[in-house]
Amino acid sequence: MARVCQQTLCLVQESFAPGLTGLVGGGASDFTHVRAVGTDYAPTPDVPYSVTPAGDGGVDRMALSGLTIPYTADGLSPEEVYVATGSEIARVDSTGSTSLASGSCGAVTGTSFWGVNVRAPGEAWGLGSGGVICKLSNNTTTLISNWNAPGTLYLYDLYQAPTGETFIAASDGIVHSLDGGALSGVLDETVDYGLVGIDGTSASNVWAVGRNGGVARLDAGSGRFDLVYDAGTDLYDVLVRGDDDVWVAQHGNALLHWDGAGWSTWPMPNLKAASLPLHFIPVPGGFHVTGQWSLAFGDPDRGFLITYAVQDAGY
C-alpha cells in the first residue's frame, strides 16, 4: 500500500476484517510480520483466534481451540506470543496454542491472570490477581511472588530494568515493586487512575499510564512515582524510547508524545474507524531500522492490525 503520512507519522500497513474483535496484543519480528491474539464474535461468539496480515489488506485468522478469552498478549515474534486468558497463560505460534504447565503457580487458588510480559525468548512473566506473579520458562511456571492481596487487585503490566529492578502497574492506581511494596507518590485516585501500562529504559526512567488519562513518571531522586500529566481520556499503553521520547496510545485514534519539554498529540493517518483502544506491539531488537521506528496496533473492538513508522529527524 502507498505510505500515508501526517507530520512524520506514516502508515506502513493496515489489515482489517469484519467480525474480528478483542485484539489484545501480540508479537512482531519486523515491520510486516506480526501476530495478534483476540476473540471472535462471528460466526461463533467468544472464539479465541490469532491473526496475521494478509496481502490483500485483510487478515489470515486461526482459531485457537481450547483457549479461553484472552485478556492481554505479548511477544517477541509471530512464533512466540504469550497470552493471559484469566485461567491460564498460553503460548501461541503458527500451529496453534499450547497451555503452559501450571507448576508451583497451580497451588495458588483463586488466581486469574490479567497480564503477561515477555522478557526474552522463552521467558515471560504472568501477572495475576491478588499479587500473584509467575515466571514462565521452558513451558513451565514458577511462583515468584504472592502478596496475598485482596482478589480485586489486578496486575496488568510489568517493566524490568536492565539492572533488575521490577515495576508493576496495577488496578489500584499504584506502581508496585516485585514484593508488593507501593512506589507511587500522588497516584492515590484508585478509581480514576487504575494503571494498565508501564515501560522504561532504565531503573531511573520509568513511565506508567492508566484509565482516565493519568500519566505517572518515576522521580529518581525520591524513588517514587508522581502524576505528571492528565490527558483527560483513557490511555491504553506506553512505549519509552528515552528520557525525552515517550509515546502513549490514547482513546480517540491518536498518540501522545513527550519530547522532554512538553506533550503533543499525533493523530494517526488513514485510520478507518473512530476511538479505537490501541495497544503497542513493538518490533524487537530496537526501534531504529534505517531511520524508522515501527509499531503494530491491535484494536480490541473492530479487528484492525496496523503498523506505523515514525521517521526520525536526520534520515
Image: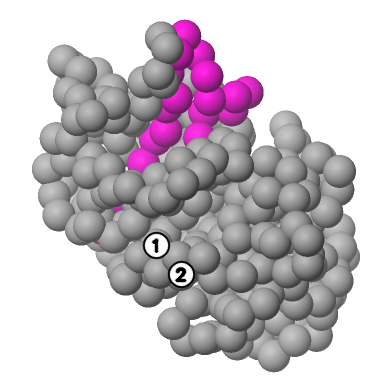
Disc nearer the start of the sequence (1/2)? 2
Residue matched to label 1 = 235
Q: In this rendered view, identify the residue nearer to me: 122 or 246.
A: 246
Predominant secondary structure in magenta? loop
Give left or right: position of 44 versus 212: left
In magenta stretch: residue 269: no
Colour pattern: one colour
**Taking 145 as reference, is 64 above or below it?**
above
Q: In this rendered view, identify the residue nearer to me: 94 or 233.
A: 233
The N terminus - image quarter: top left
- Seen at 42% across and 27% down, the residue is 294
Q: In which quarter of the image is residue 89?
A: bottom right
Of circles 1 and 2, the one toward us is 2
Q: Do callouts 1 and 2 mark residues in contact (Cβ within 8 Å)? A: yes
Which element carries disc 1, helix, strand or loop?
A: strand
Q: What separation in Å lies between label 1 and label 2 (alpha carbons)?
A: 7 Å
Q: In which quarter of the image is residue 185?
A: bottom right
Q: Is residue 49 visible?
A: no
Give left or right: position of 220 versus 142: left
- Bounds of the magenta segment: 282-301
In magenta stretch: residue 288: yes
Which element carries disc 2, helix, strand or loop?
A: strand
Q: Can residue 292 be seen in this view?
A: yes
- Seen at 58% across and 79% down, the residue is 187
- Seen at 50% across and 35% down, the residue is 282
Badge 2: residue crowd in 10 Å (few <14, some 14–19, many ≥20): many
Residue matched to label 2 = 214
Give the x, y percent position of residue 164.
86, 48
Amino acid type at mark 2: Gly
Give the x, y percent position of residue 133.
77, 65
Give left or right: position of 48 versus 276: right
Give the x, y percent position of residue 245.
51, 39
